[in-house]
Structure formats: C-alpha cells, structure tokens
Amino acid sequence: MAVERADPYPNQNFRVDIGGITSGDFTVVVLPEVCVDVIKYRGGTSVNLAVRDLPGLIRYNYVVLRRGIVGNLDLFKWIDTVRTGTIDRREVAINLLSEDHTTIAITWTLTRAWPVKYSFGDLNAQGTDVAVEELVIAYEDMIMS
C-alpha cells in the first residue's frame, strides 16, 4: 500500500523483484508509463460540428532495468527462453523504499511481464566506467499500490 507523507521520497532507494529470477542490484529503473489513446468522434446527425474526445486503447511503455555486470546469467537465460520459442511470463515488482529501506512507499507491479531486449554497454580499455547490462521488459498490465 502506498505510504503518503509531506516530503517527496528520494529516487535512489528501490528494489526490483523479477518473480523467481532475481531481485535488487539494479542501478537504474525507467518506470512504467500509462498512455490512453484519444479517439476523435462525431456522430453524423450531430448538430454540433465539434468532435468529441473519447478514451481509446491503453498503452504501456517498456520498463528498462540497468545493472552492473556481475557474471550472473539469470537475465540472459530469461530472454533466451523467448529467443528459443517459449515466452516465460513473470510478475515484476518495483518497490520505492524509504530512506532507511524499512518501508515500501509505492509498488509498481507488472503482470505477465517478459523480456523484449537484452543489451550491454560498451567496453573501453581506457575507460573507468562499470560494465552494464540492460533488460527491457514488456508487460500486459500495471498495478500501483
């Protein structure tokens, strides 16, 4: 359940749980976005020449997860099931935590989620950055609590 307070929560305290695959350890999460298509409508017998806006299809953008490469192949194995013809749908929970990590402020639950892209950052022999892997997830529905 969402925990309301006067001051906004900082965005650096979060936990991700991909049902049965992995949890935590992500450095960046691009949160879900909900969009409602707009249908322009005007009845043929309407005296008013203006169109009305009606709600159309609901669309969700993909969720992006990034983390440092630590040699764990769980994310690759998940997308590999899709690559080999089996869509392994999971429930993904993204929890925004309080500063002391004891309270879940908000949870975004992605239902029937599955990976659509798995990629890596560049390797650079002269760089000082961490090697990063990225997973992009599609899902059928989102619940906030």
Image (cartoon, rainbow, N blue to C red):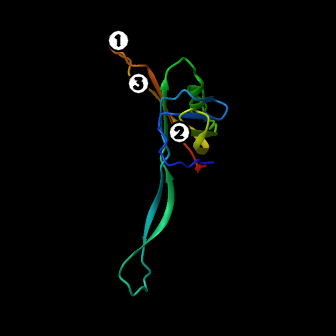
Q: Which residue is mark 3?
A: 121
Q: Position of residue 37 (x, y in %)?
A: 45, 60
Of labels 1 and 2, earlier in sequence is 1
At 61% across and 31% down in the image, what residue appears? 81
Looking at the rendered structure, the kind of residue marked 1 is Ala
User: Residue 44 lies in what quarter of the image?
Assistant: bottom left
Q: Which residue is mark 1?
A: 125
Callout 3 crowding tier (Cα within 10 Å): few <14, some 14–19, many ≥20 = some
**Decide: marks 1, 2 in contact (CB < 8 A)?**
no
User: Residue 17 lies in what quarter of the image?
Assistant: top right
Disc 3 to disc 1, how far (Cα)?
13 Å
Name the secondary structure under disc 2: strand
At 50% across and 49% down in the image, what residue appears? 6
**Decide: marks 3, 1 in contact (CB < 8 A)?**
no
Looking at the rendered structure, the kind of residue marked 3 is Gly
Lateral position of residue 52 relative to residue 90, left or right: left
Q: Which residue is mark 2?
A: 137
Q: On screen, 27 above or below 2?
A: above
Of labels 3 and 2, earlier in sequence is 3
Compare residues 11 and 56 and report the one nearer the observer: 11
At 38% across and 22% down in the image, what residue appears? 122
Callout 1 crowding tier (Cα within 10 Å): few <14, some 14–19, many ≥20 = few
Q: Residue furthest right?
A: 20
Disc 1 to disc 2, how far (Cα)?
30 Å
Q: Position of residue 42 (x, y in %)?
A: 42, 77
